[in-house]
Image (tube, rainbow, N blue to C red):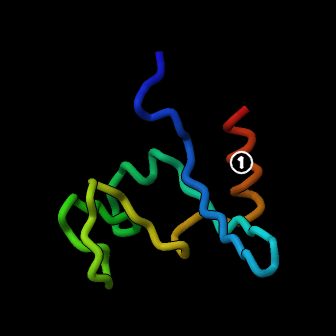
C-alpha cells in the first residue's frame, strides 16, 4: 500500500533548453520542508505566490534556492541516507 508521502527529498534542477543542459541547484528533505521555519513558507490555497499576482490552487510549501543544501558533503550524505 502506498502512502501519500512517497518522496524523501525535493530536488531543484535548473534546465537550460538553449544549452541542452541541467544543473542540480540544491535539495531539501521532506522533513525539513514540513517543519515550518523561517526558511520554509507555508502557503495556503487562495493566497498569492509571494511577489506575484498568481493565486495558489492548492496548499503548498516554498523555500528559496539559497536555503537549499548544495555542498558536496550534503549530497553525499543524502545519497548515503537513501541507501
- Point out residue 62 in the picture as x, y percentages from the top left corner: 40, 64
- Point out residue 17 in the picture as x, y percentages from the top left corner: 73, 75
Relative depth, front residue between 81 and 58: 58
Circle 1 residue: 77
- Identify the residue at horizontal 31%, vertical 73% (top origin): 49
- Identify the residue at horizontal 33%, vertical 56% (top origin): 60
- Point out residue 31 in the picture as x, y percentages from the top left corner: 45, 45
Q: How many marks?
A: 1
Q: Is residue 56 left or right of residue 14?
A: left
- Point out residue 40 in the picture as x, y percentages from the top left corner: 38, 64
Which type of secondary structure does the marked residue at label 1 adopt? helix
Relative depth, front residue between 58 and 66: 58
Q: Is residue 76 shown above or below 62?
A: above
Which quadrant holds residue 25? bottom right
Relative depth, front residue between 47 and 20: 20
Which quadrant holds residue 13? bottom right
- Identify the residue at horizontal 66%, vertical 71% (top origin): 14
Q: Residues within 10 Å of mark 1 (few under 14, many from 20)?
A: few
Q: Report the residue that reaches farthest toward the top.
A: 1
Q: Is residue 79 left or right of residue 12?
A: right
Q: Is residue 68 shown above or below 81?
A: below
Q: Report the residue that reaches farthest toward the left.
A: 46
Q: Is residue 50 left or right of residue 2?
A: left
Q: Report the residue that reaches farthest toward the bottom.
A: 51
Q: Quadrant of the C terminus?
A: top right
Relative depth, front residue between 77 and 27: 27
Q: Is residue 4 shown above or below 63?
A: above
Amino acid at each position: 500500500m502506498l502512502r501519500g508521502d512517497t518522496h524523501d527529498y525535493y530536488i531543484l534542477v535548473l534546465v537550460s533548453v538553449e544549452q541542452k543542459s541541467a544543473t542540480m541547484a540544491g535539495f531539501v528533505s521532506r522533513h525539513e520542508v514540513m517543519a515550518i521555519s523561517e526558511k520554509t513558507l507555508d502557503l495556503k490555497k487562495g493566497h498569492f505566490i509571494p511577489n506575484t499576482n498568481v493565486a495558489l490552487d492548492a496548499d503548498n510549501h516554498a523555500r528559496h534556492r539559497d536555503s537549499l543544501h548544495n555542498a558536496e558533503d550534503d549530497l553525499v550524505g543524502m545519497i548515503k541516507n537513501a541507501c
